Amino acid sequence: MEKRLYKSDDSIIFGVCGGIAEFLGLDPVMVRIGYVFLMLFSLSFPGLLLYIIMACIMPHKRYILKN
């Protein structure tokens, strides 16, 4: 079975960081904290733009696995 990147059901906003954590096998809280630091050090705009793009592109697991 191949690993695929999906939005997570363990979500705070859109499930992007939770999905990345599940894909990498990490704790979702640590991924979220890392992402906040990334946004702070990149002056927020590129990090926020990346998050919005990923929220639009990444499929949600519950919709894909139903089919």
Image (tube, grey):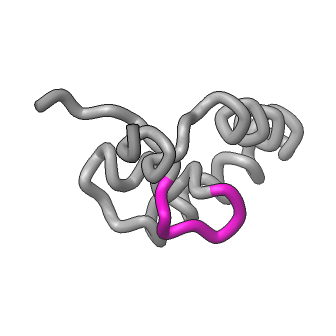
Considering only vertical position in the picture, is 50 above or below 60?
A: above
Estimate the x, y position of residue 50 in percent, counting from the top left.
72, 33
Considering only vertical position in the picture, is 67 above or below 15?
A: above
Viewer-closest of 47 and 5: 5
Instruction: Identify which residue is drawn at 43% across, 65% down.
Output: 28
Q: Is residue 7 left or right of residue 52?
A: left
Residue at far left of view: 1
Viewer-closest of 4 and 47: 4
Instruction: Identify which residue is drawn at 30% across, 59% down.
Output: 26
| Residue 33 is one of the magenta-drawn residues | no
Estimate the x, y position of residue 15 in percent, counting from the top left.
58, 57
Instruction: Identify which residue is drawn at 82% across, 34% down.
Output: 49
Instruction: Identify which residue is drawn at 36% across, 44% down.
Output: 65
Viewer-closest of 39 and 13: 13
Estimate the x, y position of residue 37 in percent, counting from the top left.
65, 56
Q: Is residue 19 left or right of residue 59?
A: left
**Over which residues does the magenta segment extend?**
8-14
Quarter of the image with the C terminus is top left
* Residue 2 picture quarter: top left
Quarter of the image with the N terminus is top left
Number of numbered discs: 0
Considering only vertical position in the picture, is 37 above or below 1?
A: below
